[in-house]
Structures are given as structure tokens and as C-alpha cells.
Image: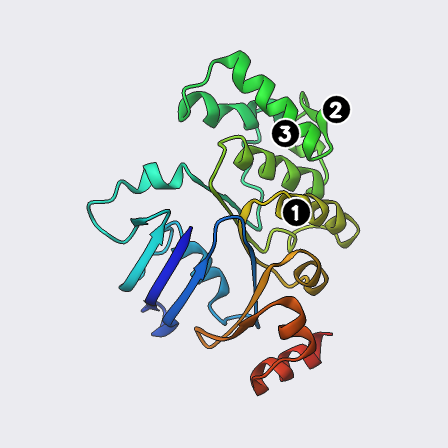
Amino acid sequence: MIDVQNVSKTFYVPHIVKALRNVTCKVDFGEAVVVIGPSGSGKSTFLRCLNRLEVAEEGHIYVDGIDILDRKTNINKVRAEIGIVFQSFNLFPHKTVLQNVTLAQTVVRKRSKEEAKNKAMALLEKVGIPEKANVYPDQLSGGQQQRVAIARSLSMDPKVMLFDEATSAIDPEMIREVLNVMQTLASEGMTMVVVTHEMGFAREAADRVIFMDGGRIVEEGSPEEVFDNPVEERTQKFLSQII
């Protein structure tokens, strides 16, 4: 589903930072890949490059066979197949929960209002908040807002879901409810790439774990391999400080 080949990304402002250094990896259809690592290791940049929110200057990124770094690629068409959930919820504050989840369906997918509403209500049921359909985002907890954001992304029937620290802006007591939704998606076979500091989630939900540091993939393997028997010294040091 995703094939990343020798991707590099450099930021030049306010100073030169090599955020990604020749990153190569693949994500298979239906696979849940969790990316871990210290702050500044390149995790979020890597994720944002997967739908060209950040443009890598070297390498190739194929999503479902399409090279998204090719200038001829219609990136908006590709992005319609990639759901992404950020740290901040990015909900429209002046629209109800239901309107937030139906808007893109009617504009981008050209669904009827009734079809979009039915889809939205089914997804709000899935994430556990159907009773919040007619309230506004500021009436929700952080965990509830993030579940709306997930429902909104799922409403587009994406081929891939990207999660960028989806629980980092949520009250600790509400984190579990969001992780449960993400874990359900993983168990159902959704292709997912998840950047997170939640090691418990990584161990429970990931098919594969990638550890990044210094803009490189240092180690990758099954949760058991990475967490219980890490090979690289840098991985061992990182895990010893957080587990």
C-alpha cells in the first residue's frame, strides 16, 4: 500500500535540519505500523510526507502504486484516499458534530445529504458518541473531539489512515477512549501508520514497530522483537528510559 524509497527531507528555516535521511520502508495492505522515537527524530515529518503535506526533496513515495512526489500526480485525488488525524482536532467550531462528519462526504465524495448523514451516524456509533451528533465541538471533551475527527476521516472510506500523535493534546483520563477506537480499526484490518508515544498501544495494536532517531529508521520489527529484544543500542537506551 505504501512504498517509501530513499526519502530525505531538509528544513532550512530557522536553521538547517536534516529531518529525514534516506528513509526506506513499506507498509502492506491491512498492516498497522506504529512509529516511535524521541522528539525531533523525524517521526511526524515522515508521516506528513506520506500525503505530501511535507514535500521530500529526494526519493520516491508510492501510495497504492502512485508516486505522490511526481509533479504530474493529482495530489488532491490521492489525499482523498488517505485519512489523517492530527494532534489538534481541526474541527469546524461553527458546525455541529454531524455537519463536521458529513461536509467532506457531500463536497468531495458527492454523496447525497441523506447518504452522508447515514454514513456519519454509523461512524459516530462506531466511535461511541452517536448522542453527540447535534452538539458543537466546544461542548465536547478532548477525547470526544478526537473521536469526531477520526469519524470524519473514516467517512471518506480511506485506503490508509495516518495518526500523528493523536492523543498528545488529550487529558490523560481520556486517552484510552481514543486508543480503543484506533485499536479497533487496527483489528479490523485498516491500513494504518501511527506516530505515538503510547508504548502500550504500540505493543497491543501494531503489526510492526519502527523506531526512528536522527531522521533515520534505526530498527523495525514486530512489537515483541522491538520491545522485548531490541538489537540496536540506541533502541535499547530509548526504551529503557520510557518503559
Residue located beneath label 3 in the image: 123
Residue drawn at x 33%, y 38% is 76
What colour scheme has been applied to the protein in the rendered image?
rainbow
Residue drawn at x 66%, y 80% is 229
Mark 1, mark 3: which one is toward the viewer?
1
Of the pair 119 and 129, the residue shown nearer to us: 119
Q: Quadrant of the C terminus?
A: bottom right
Identify the disc placed on residue 187: 1
Q: Earlier in the sequence, mark 2 or mark 1?
A: 2
Residue located beneath label 2 in the image: 131
Q: Position of residue 105 (x, y in %)?
A: 47, 24
Cα separation between marks 2 and 3: 12 Å
Q: Position of residue 239 (x, y in %)?
A: 67, 77
Residue drawn at x 73%, y 33% is 128
Q: Position of residue 47 (x, y in %)?
A: 46, 57
Circles 2, 3 touching at the beta carbon (< 8 Å): no
Q: Please, what is the three-letter code of the amino acid marked with disc 2?
A: Glu
Disc 3 secondary structure class? helix
147 lies above or below 196: above
Cα separation between marks 1 and 3: 16 Å
